[in-house]
Each structure stands twice: as C-alpha cells, then as structure tokens.
Amino acid sequence: MAKPDYDMTQGELYSVADSMFASLSDPAKLAKFAAKKPAKYVPGILLTLKATLNTAKNMPDSVQVSSIHETNLLDLQSLTISCEDNLQDLKTYIHDGWPKQYWKVKYDEAGMVDYEQASHGNWESVVSMNAKMIDFIGNYPVELAAGNMPAGFALQVQSDSDAFDLKYTDFKNSRETAAVTAAKINANNVLYAALQDIQNDAHSAFRRDAAGMREFMISVVKILVSPPGSASLGMTFIEVGSNLPLANVKVTIQSATGIAKVAVSVADGTLEFTHLDPANYRVLVQAPGKPDMNLTKEVNTGVNARMKVMV
C-alpha cells in the first residue's frame, strides 16, 4: 500500500509546489541555484518540474473515484424503481390472466420473492427479480396476453434489466479505488521529492540570504499558502432507499495532529465545520439505527470542502 511521504494535504502539496516553482522562475533566483549547480539548474528545469506537478495533479484520486461510485449508486436506485414498477405492472397482468388461487404462487414465480430486499438496496436481489420476470414472461405468453399485457412490455422489462446490469457493473468497478489511490500517492511522492531536492539546494544557494531561502523552505511556504483555521467542511446525509435527508447524524472529525471536533446534522441533513486547519481528517459518522461509518476527507484552505454521504 502506497503511503504519502509528505506531511500535508494533497492540495497543500500542489500549492507549495506552485509557489516554489514560481520563485524559481525568477531569473535572479534561478541564477543563484545555477551558480552552485550549473549542470542541474538549466532553464529547462522548470519545464521538467512543472511536468512533474501536472502529472500528479491530473491523476484521478480516491475522492474523484468515490464521487463516481456515489453517482453510480444514485443511478442504481433510480433504475431499481423502474424494475420494481415493472413487477407491479406484471402482477396486474397475472391478476387478470390466472384464477385467484394461483395469484400468490405466480407472483412469487415472477419475482415477488425478491421484491422486499430489492427495494432496500440489495442489488443482487434486483438482478434476481429481473431474471425471474424475464423468464416468467417467456414461459407464459398466452396467459399474460389474456391478462392484457401490452405487446411491448416484455421488451421494456428486458431493456430495464439490461440497463440495471450495466450500471451495476459500473458500480462494482467504481469501488476499486486502491490502485488509483496508490498511483496518485506515488506521483505525489515524486513531486514532493523534487521539492525536497530544491529545499536542500536552497541551503547552499541562499546561505547568506535568509529571506530568499524562506521561499524554498517547504514548511514555511506551506504556512503561507495554507494558514491555520482557513478551511471548512460541509456534509449532507441522505438515507439509502428513501433518498430523504437524515437528521441527528453525529459526526466526529480529527486530523493527525489536531483535537476532535463534533457536529450533528439538522433537519435538512446538513452540518458544517468551520475554521478548520487544512489537513486530512478521519471522519466518524454515527447515524441513529445505522452502523458506524469511518471515512477520510482532505480539507484545504480556500475550498469549501463538501461530502454527500448515503447512510
């Protein structure tokens, strides 16, 4: 598992790099580095350094992948409703096509045995329900026609089932964030190593120039671009299944070096943490009647960080 070499958020890392590279683009400052290491600090070094920064920036991270995953989840919920509606319609055709004593057994054969779990977010139950509907329609064309089933209904059920299966595959694939995260962290580590290299050389290039050296000291630049208390985090909680806002969710956040902060969601499912130090936060979500959730969130200065959580 890749681990960050940098003791800061990803956003801070990129801001520090932007600032240090901007300072290095000053011909007078670059000349001081070149005076000590002329073969290394050639004009083209800035293009190489900026390419390293852009490579790291442009790689997707776990937050982006998580967002895709959450979007796929919302799409799955919408598609499930269509599949559930198909079963409810199919029940009416069974009602008209069979005597009353057969209704219950035919409902179950058509997929009703899976309906309850499917309606509560059990995706495998949705797959099973759809498969049963398709088989049932194929097995009883005469009876269903007598039950007034429209000619295009079978195609609709198949189409909705195919759409669900495709989105379900996307949903499962979007959970695999480990490889994406490792690649991103490795690229960030390469960038951080480049910043450390510049910092080390600055001790020699600016030995008698404390002010100039400060522009290339990572810890100093970090405070300038990301002051303490300059960040915030807002969260919204939505209940799985009902898609309704969830109040009274207790959230505890804590960075590696800070104290824990607690907030509780209000009626519209939202809560807000303000005046945070930019950092990576561990997030504990405790919703009434739900299992606890442990998440992580990067919070940077100048950005109103947001999280939408399905619970």
Image (cartoon, rainbow, N blue to C red):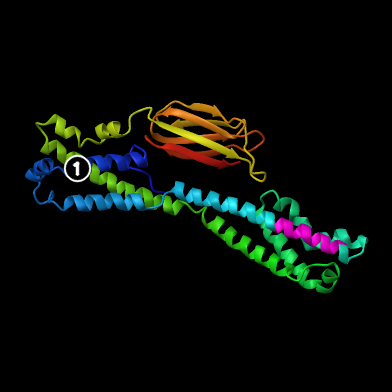
Magenta: predominant secondary structure element? helix
Say whether residue 309 is left or right of residue 4: right
Q: Residues within 10 Å of mark 1 (few under 14, many from 20)?
A: many
As drawn, the residue found furthest toward the bottom would be: 142
Foreground of the two, 90 or 9 = 90
Position in image of residue 15 (x %, y %): 30, 40
Q: Amino acid at mark 1?
A: Ile
Q: Is residue 273 above or below residue 41?
A: above
- Residue ID at (34%, 37%): 8
Is 161 left, or right, of 97 in this rendering? Answer: left
Taking the spot 38% from the left edge, 27% from the top edge, the residue there is 229
Q: Which residue is mark 1?
A: 198
| Residue 227 coordinates in the image, percent (x, y) | 33, 29
Secondary structure under the numbered disc 1 in the rendered image: helix
Quarter of the image where one finds residue 195: top left
Q: Position of residue 222 (x, y in %)?
A: 29, 34
Tell me the quarter of the picture where residue 271 sits: top right
Q: Which residues are magenta?
A: 83-95
Q: Position of residue 236 (x, y in %)?
A: 55, 37
Q: Residue at x 73, y 56 (%)?
A: 85
State which quarter of the image contains the C terminus: top right
Compared with 160, 245 (above or below) is above
Could you say which quadrant of the image residue 287 lies in? top right
Residue 90 lies within the magenta run: yes
- Compared across the picture, whether 275 is left or right of 241 comes to left
